[in-house]
Image (cartoon, rainbow, N blue to C red):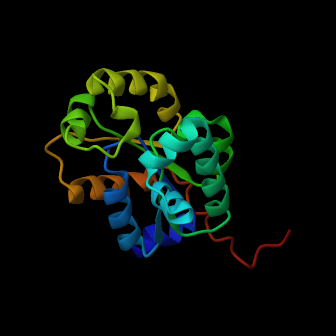
Amino acid sequence: MAILRDRLQGTNLYLIGMMGAGKSTIGQQIAKQLDYRFFDTDQVIEQATGQAIRDLFAGMGEMEFRRLETQVLSELAPYTRLVVATGGGIVSQSQNWSYLRHGLVIWLNVPIEVLYQRLQQDTTRPLLQTADPLAKLQLLLQERRSLYAQADLEIPIEASDTTEQVVDRVLSQIPTILKPMPEQIPSNLDF
């Protein structure tokens, strides 16, 4: 891990993907392995406002929530050595990409059926409080897929994958998108 940590040179990792993709769980493990700090934008918003995400959505609406999300992202971006699990809709605000692009953006791509299975009993997701949550998930993914695809790295995840397998896959794939380390220039060269 030390070699990968050295190659990252403090670059932040931003995990994007649909709700239920496992961004927080995976992100915490990646941060632990890299000796990075971990932040979840939803948790930061809840701590800052003293309200649950579903209550914020109900009280202020999605657009105001997205503004808070952008504010949190802008405040985290200047730091280094962070793994940040983002909200599923963070990619929908073009301004957020200016912050995300300061780090490596990793898309945890989970099939819709798996997401639906994971989220069926979850009443904390405001966007799924509808008569047909599966249709809503499909619509959200359809709207966001091209945005998620702008990530530096896509990690496909299947229902049978363990957290450890996904973390290992992410960590093994990161070097494939990093620039090669510059070769040492011999000090005895005359220019």
Question: Which sits in the foreground, 144 or 139?
Answer: 139
Q: Which residue of the protein is positioned furthest toward the front in this rendering? A: 59
User: Where is residue 188 shown, x and y percent of the image?
Assistant: 75, 79
Q: Residue shown at 39%/21% (left/top)?
A: 139
Q: Quadrant of residue 9?
A: bottom right
User: Where is residue 116 shown, x and y percent of the image?
Assistant: 23, 33
Question: Which sits in the foreground, 66 or 54?
Answer: 54
Vertical placement of residue 169 versus 50, above or below: above
Question: Which sits in the foreground, 35 or 86?
Answer: 86
Vertical placement of residue 123 versus 50, above or below: above
Q: Quadrant of residue 67?
A: top right
Q: Residue shown at 45%/27% (left/top)?
A: 145
Q: Residue shown at 53%/58% (left/top)?
A: 45
Is the N terminus in the top left, top right, bottom left or bottom right quadrant? Answer: bottom left
Vertical placement of residue 130 versus 28, above or below: above
Q: Is residue 161 left or right of residue 101?
A: left
User: Where is residue 117 shown, x and y percent of the image?
Assistant: 18, 36
Q: Which residue of the protein is positioned furthest toward the left in this rendering? A: 160
Q: Which residue of the protein is positioned furthest toward the bottom in this rendering? A: 188
| Residue 178 visible in this rendered orientation of the protein | yes
User: Where is residue 58 shown, x and y percent of the image?
Assistant: 48, 40
